[in-house]
């Protein structure tokens, strides 16, 4: 089992400058350069050290509840004419994959001597995960959250309060995830020495996309071993939703070296293809610099970053992790988008036939997988079920449940 | 392909203006205004007022994600965007000035609007509009090679920022590479963090300025949190110039007298 858990592809990227091909890099105010240098030194020194790994693995096992299950989905398999397997990150503590990263980063923050944790959140899952991990590890935590998201993900705001975090609503800019990241960066600029910024997705300046990928790759390593053990072989395709792209890179990365395994990332197609109607930065974006990284972003003719739309707060972001931009241009991973209505339809189907209420984010991956199954009968499909949908009840009340 | 910089590069006008002012025994005044704020219509008039009263003008190109800016400049930036301000519009307005202002002009822009404009076209378009240099707050030295060599072709400055947390070795390196002037950020934080007349700059700010100056052959200007005559006066002998940004944008925001405010900073 242990030999199956190691990453099978050599981690070629990022290079020394934090580049994934042409993407990535470190575009931040000068004030943050020493802080990122310190973070890089900490990552180099601790991340793969035996001492850090043993503490991290211990927390993942005894507190997060890892390994998460790999579930066969018999009814979806029958309905879609495929073999459908679900990697159940919804079963991880706090209800999504976000906790893997939060625990890892806050353990790192303690080693770096940080006095407080700040985090941003979109759907609230990373905020809840950071609040929980900070409480567990005895650190004060402030979470920046767009005012629009505070409203549409209200249950998570209450959870963060109970977990001892201070939630700061952000009204500037688009008042969603992007504005929350801007505000967290401003906080960090004000106290680059004492504050640790626990960034929640595989985005931002180097080394964050790398750090987050390394911490989230536990998803793909487990899933790969579980597929071999339970399904008798690797999947034909692994499917994950992509907002910033942390659960997708975590699922995909350990499969990069398996040439026979197709990888499919699913973005939020929102309500249409027009600028502002979706959050599909890979399939509709153009290269640019946003929040520390050169990547694919949704922008207008003047380089102004566009507001996005998605029914799912966790995918509602104008950029994407630079490694995904690289994996798309290198054609190793295919990316598609799924509309709001399609995602909700897939959510309802999975709930009704498999007894799993997924997050609306994850439901995008389910719909993408269903579409893949129709085109590839009999395919063995692994879906990253990145989180559970309890937090989405307010929006589900207004959509799927509105006529009840 | 890179062109040779002209014998007298536009960027030299920046350091010359700062040194000339500093030679009179007071720090040069660098005034910042967000382009097209509070309205596009009033831009030329506001610019004229700032250019008349200041030694150097810094024009902010609005951006949707101004991560280094505090609430005042964020507000101005969003308002200007809502009013339709773009980089091409700004360059057109500047190119149309006749006569041009004598105070050298810099553009402060986050990187993405510059990338979208095109680094191949930007230097020529900026030089033709009378721009002498750029300040790019989200472009650290390590990522600045492409823009710097593009601007070099037209003799334009890329102003380097340094901060109180910049380690000594890096400070030396950054100052050595500086063009136009060194922008010494007075504190960790965003622009406009300090509010109100009683707001205090860090107690060791003057020692820090002396340290930066000892590393730099280019003039050194202090920026962030400077909003009163007393503060400007304190920098005499410690900085070649001071940047006044959020405080000036606040005057624009409330429709105040820009000239009177800037004169009030110069002392009796």
Image: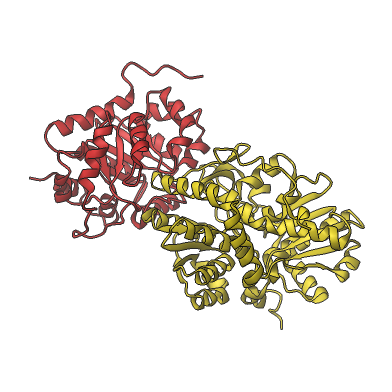
Which chain can be seen in red?
B
Q: Position of residue A250 (x, y in %)?
A: 68, 55
A291 lies above or below B97: below
On the question of residue A348 being in view, the answer is yes
In this view, the residue in front, B200 or B86, is B200
Colour basis: by chain
Residue placed furthest toward the left = B268
Quarter holding residue B99? top left
Which residue appears at 78% of the width and 56% of the height? A224
Q: How many marks?
A: 0
Which residue appears at 70% of the width and 71% of the height? A91
Which chain can be seen in yellow?
A
Residue placed furthest toward the front = A51
B113 lies above or below A264: above
Quarter holding residue A331? top right
In this view, the residue in front, A34 or A267, is A34
Q: Position of residue A246 (x, y in %)?
A: 63, 56
On the question of residue A395 being in view, the answer is no
In the rendered structure, the answer to whether residue B102 lies left or right of residue A166 reads: left
Image quadrant in which the N terminus of chain A is located: bottom right
Quarter holding residue A18? top right
In this view, the residue in front, B241 or A67, is A67
In the rendered structure, the answer to whether residue A49 lies left or right of residue B211 reads: right
Q: Position of residue A204 (x, y in %)?
A: 53, 50
In the rendered structure, the answer to whether residue B50 lies left or right of residue A71 reads: left
Image quadrant in which the C terminus of chain A is located: bottom right
In the rendered structure, the answer to whether residue B54 lies left or right of residue A43 reads: left
Q: Position of residue B104 (x, y in %)?
A: 28, 32
């Amino acid at each position: 089992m242990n030999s199956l858990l190691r990453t099978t592809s050599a981690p070629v990227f990022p290079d020394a400058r934090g580049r994934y091909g042409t993407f990535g890099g470190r575009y931040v105010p000068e004030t943050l350069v020493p802080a990122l240098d310190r973070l890089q030194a900490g990552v180099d020194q601790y991340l793969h050290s035996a001492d850090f790994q043993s503490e991290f693995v211990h927390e993942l096992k005894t507190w997060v509840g890892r390994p998460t299950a790999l579930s066969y989905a018999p009814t979806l398999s029958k309905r879609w004419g495929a073999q459908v397997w679900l990697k159940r990150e919804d079963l991880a503590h706090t209800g999504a994959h976000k906790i893997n990263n939060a625990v890892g980063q806050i353990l790192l923050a303690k080693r770096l001597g940080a006095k407080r944790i700040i985090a941003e959140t979109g759907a609230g899952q990373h905020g809840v995960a950071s609040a929980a991990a900070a409480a567990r590890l005895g650190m004060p935590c402030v979470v920046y959250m767009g005012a629009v998201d505070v409203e549409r993900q209200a249950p998570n705001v209450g959870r963060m309060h109970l977990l001892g975090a201070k939630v700061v609503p952000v009204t500037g800019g688009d008042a969603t995830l992007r504005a929350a990241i801007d505000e967290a960066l401003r906080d960090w600029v004000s106290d680059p020495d004492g504050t640790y910024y626990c960034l929640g997705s595989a985005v931002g300046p180097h080394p964050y996309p790398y750090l987050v990928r390394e911490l989230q790759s536990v998803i793909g390593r487990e899933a790969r071993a579980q597929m071999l053990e339970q399904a008798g072989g690797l999947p034909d395709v692994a499917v994950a939703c992509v907002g910033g792209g942390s659960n997708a890179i975590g699922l995909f990365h350990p499969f990069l070296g398996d040439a026979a395994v197709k990888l499919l990332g699913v973005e939020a197609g929102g309500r249409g293809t027009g600028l502002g109607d979706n959050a599909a930065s890979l399939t509709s974006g153009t290269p640019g610099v946003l929040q520390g990284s050169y990547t694919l972003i949704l922008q207008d003719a003047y380089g102004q970053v566009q507001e996005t739309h998605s029914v799912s707060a966790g995918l509602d972001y104008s950029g994407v992790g630079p490694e995904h931009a690289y994996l798309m241009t290198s054609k190793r991973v295919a990316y598609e988008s799924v509309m709001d209505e399609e995602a909700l339809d897939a959510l309802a189907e999975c709930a009704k036939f498999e007894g799993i209420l997924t997050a609306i984010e994850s439901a995008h991956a389910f719909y993408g997988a269903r579409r893949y199954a129709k085109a590839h009968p009999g395919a063995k499909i692994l879906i990253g079920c990145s989180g559970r949908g309890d937090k989405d009840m307010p929006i589900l009340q207004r959509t799927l449940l509105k006529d009840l | 392909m890179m062109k040779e910089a002209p014998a007298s590069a536009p960027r030299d006008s920046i350091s010359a203006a700062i040194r000339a002012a500093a030679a009179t025994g007071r720090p040069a005044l660098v005034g910042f205004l967000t382009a097209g704020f509070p309205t596009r219509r009033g831009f030329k008039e506001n610019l004229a007022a700032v250019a008349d009263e200041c030694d150097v003008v810094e024009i902010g190109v609005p951006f949707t994600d101004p991560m280094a800016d505090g609430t005042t400049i964020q507000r101005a930036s969003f308002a200007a965007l809502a009013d339709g301000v773009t980089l091409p519009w700004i360059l057109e307005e500047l190119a149309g000035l006749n006569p041009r202002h004598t105070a050298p002009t810099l553009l402060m822009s986050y990187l993405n609007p510059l990338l979208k404009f095109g680094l191949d076209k930007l230097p020529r378009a900026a030089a033709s509009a009378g721009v002498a240099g750029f300040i790019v707050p989200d472009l650290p030295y390590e990522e600045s090679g492409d823009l710097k060599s593009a601007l070099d072709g037209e003799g334009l400055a890329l102003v380097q920022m340094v901060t109180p947390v910049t380690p000594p070795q890096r400070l030396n390196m950054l100052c050595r590479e500086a063009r136009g002037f060194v922008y010494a950020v007075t504190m960790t934080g965003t622009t406009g963090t300090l509010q109100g007349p009683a707001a205090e700059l860090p107690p060791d700010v003057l020692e820090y300025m002396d340290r930066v100056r000892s590393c730099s052959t280019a003039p050194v200007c202090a920026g962030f949190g400077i909003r009163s005559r007393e503060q400007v006066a304190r920098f005499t002998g410690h900085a070649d110039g001071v940047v006044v940004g959020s405080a000036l944008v606040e005057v624009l925001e409330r429709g105040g007298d820009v000239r009177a405010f800037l004169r009030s900073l110069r002392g009796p």
